[in-house]
Amino acid sequence: MIEVDRLTKRFGPVTAVDGLSFTVRPGRVTGFLGPNGAGKTTTMRVILGLDAPTSGTARVNQKSYASLIRPLHQVGALLDATALHGGRTARPTCCRSRRPTASGGSGSPRCCG
């Protein structure tokens, strides 16, 4: 789970993120939408421990990203969409990453269904 609570990030006199709070539940693919300069990348950088918040917190599975033992096994992020091949879609990636359920079935049928 990702929890952001009253996150603020300032760069000198510029406030990039101002009091942002949200929760992303486990198993949800989530994206930020907004105009350039809205603070999307800054928020992701704080969540991933690449920037320190001015105030507030960002936690992944109830810990700061830096405190996670094997963070790449718990968090996936894409900060630069130009890093993707133009012909690729999310569907094959989601389908490959599905894990079997306890009953032996596959993950969410909405992914490839």
Image: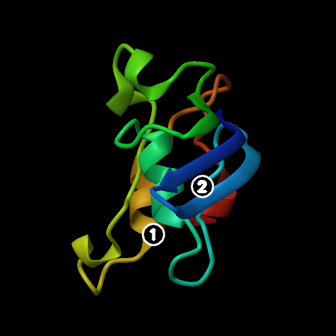
Name the secondary structure under disc 2: loop
Q: Nearer the viewer, residue 27 or 57?
A: 57
Provide the secondary structure element on which disc 1 rests: helix
The answer to which image quadrant residue 16 occupies is: bottom right
Among all residues in the image, which is located at the extreme front?
Answer: 13
**Left or right for 21, reference 45:** right
Q: Position of residue 21 (x, y in %)?
A: 76, 46
Q: Is residue 2 above or below residue 38?
A: above
Q: Nearer the viewer, mark 2 or mark 1?
A: 2
Q: Quadrant of the C terminus?
A: bottom right
Q: Position of residue 40 (x, y in %)?
A: 54, 65
In this picture, residue 2 sits left or right of residue 64: right
Q: Is residue 22 above or below residue 103?
A: below
**Closest to the observer: 70 or 17?**
17
> For the point 55% across and 19% down, which residue is it?
63
Q: How busy is the neighbourhood of tag 2: few (under 14 within 10 Å), some, or many (20 plus)?
A: few
- The label shown at residue 101 is none
Determine which residue is flagged by label 2.
Answer: 29
Q: Residue at x 58, y 61 (%)?
A: 15
Q: Earlier in the sequence, mark 2 or mark 1?
A: 2
Q: CA distance from mark 2 to mark 1?
A: 10 Å
Q: Residue at x 62, y 75 (%)?
A: 33
x, y (%) of residue 68? 42, 18
Q: Residue at x 61, y 58 (%)?
A: 17
Mark 2 belongs to which amino acid?
Answer: Val
Q: Are marks 2 and 1 in contact (CB under 8 Å)?
A: yes
Would residue 94 appear left or right of 33 to someone viewing this image? left
Q: Which of the pair 46/110 is nearer the observer?
A: 46
Residue count near mark 1 (Cα–Cα under 10 Å), binned few <14, some 14–19, many ≥20: few
Q: Residue type at mark 1?
A: Ala
Q: Which residue is mark 1?
A: 90
Q: Is residue 44 left or right of residue 57?
A: left
